[in-house]
Amino acid sequence: MYIRSFTISVAIAQVASLVSADASNFWQSFTSQINPKNITIPSIPQTTSTEPVTECTYYNPDPTLITINNTEWPSIWEVATTNNVNTSVEFTAVYNSIDWTKAPNIPVRTFTAAGGLDFTGYSATSDPDCWWSASVCTKPKLADINEDIANCPEPETWGLTYDDGPNCSQNAFYDYLEEQKLKATMFYIGSNVLDWPYGAMRGVLDGHHVAGHTWSHQYTTTLTNQQVLAELYYTHKAIKLATGLTPRYWRPPYGDIDDRVRWIASQLGLTAIMWNLDTDDWEAGFTTTVETVQKNYDAFELMGTNGTFATSGNIVLTHEINNTTMSLAITNLPKIMSSYKQVLDVATCYNISQPYFEDFEWTHTLNSSVTPASGSSSATQGTVTSSSAKINQSSTSGAYQIGPNSLLVIAILSAALI
């Protein structure tokens, strides 16, 4: 991997600043060769075909676009503290930038013998920890924690979201969304992003709102503080590598979040996006039938015309996880669009003008005023100016910053002077 030459004084200063940095600045050390305002996806069979076997054949990304050094990443699909990354200079600096004495005194959750979350002794009624899995709580019980976003505030609005991407066989699905001029909030898994980086690139190229969905899709309340931090950190690092952008928003797998996990995410400046309708589409063909999931869609589509959402909208949980879920989406989107006044990504339905940490302005906004979500300080009022997003000319992809992969070299250089 190419490392630029730096003076020893700059090296020392960089290490010192990273160690003492506020955790919310974690994204500033990320690097990317991708300019999100000028993305060109390589034309290879995996990016042009709509035949799943061809699309899902692994490829090595063009090194002029994406360079993956496996030693600086967790093991794919394993908890994000694997591959010794939790002891690296890079991760240790971020971990130590957080004052863990202020972390909520909430226990790490456990599983029952049957494999479900163990709620023994926990009161879902009082729900002292705002544990979503126990009570569907979205408003933290503790101070200085970002409140979840759980529904679109605009009436008769379908909040369009898809979890578990980028899926390797996404081409036909993304083609359809593009043809219909639909933008969704796409929650990408870090492991999937490293496996299929061009898929993540397409998400940004097509104008979707990209957010994080952890590195390995664990129940986050069952993870230690260090593991939660790593799951968030390396997911957002992967998205930055592949797209040039670092999301401010994320979704916990299975909706499993409590105030301990929220507090850790808030230290990174991240806000959770939940949902208030669940299609259960991921179960189709596994634990239930496609017909059963279709009935869920039918019921939710009816809500768009029967007054259920006359005063506010929804955010619907659906998945990019496989061809069944994406086919269900394509089948149902025409009915959804005819039943609801608006079908929007979450950034748009909240008029969030800065959904990424970089200087990337989201301009696909509503022609109306809304009340920003607590913990979503970037929500603003706005008017429709474009169906895409724009980047101020001053922004960069981060390619000229000192990258985390260089920190060990810098640290060694610094130590040599002491």
Image (tube, rainbow, N blue to C red):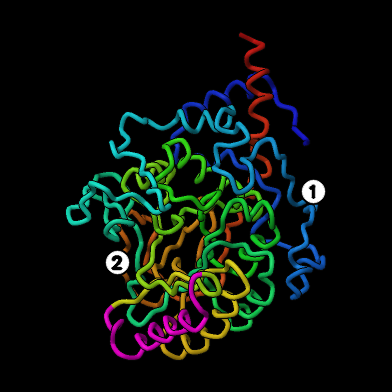
Near-viewer residue (123 or 141) = 123
Q: What's the amino acid at mark 1?
A: Pro
Provide the secondary structure element on which disc 1 rests. Answer: loop
Query: Which residue is outermost to the right?
Result: 44
Would residue 357 be visible to someone looking at this image? yes
| Residue tagged 2 | 371
Q: How far apart are marks 1 and 2 (CA)?
A: 44 Å
What is the quadrant of residue 326 in the picture?
Answer: bottom right
Q: What's the amino acid at mark 2?
A: Thr
For the C terminus, the image quarter is top right
Find the magenta span and give its range.
287-311
244 shown above or below 409:
below
346 shown above or below 8:
below
Q: In the rendered view, does 335 fall on the left or right side of 54?
A: left
CB of mark 1 within 8 Å of CB of mark 2?
no
The total number of labels drawn is: 2
Percent from the top left, x then y, of residue 257? 37, 52
126 shown above or below 404:
below
Percent from the top left, x then y, of residue 413? 68, 18
* Of pointers 1 and 2, the one earlier in the residue sequence: 1
| Residue tagged 1 | 63
Residue at position x 56%, y 55% in the image: 189
Provide the secondary structure element on which disc 2 rests. Answer: loop
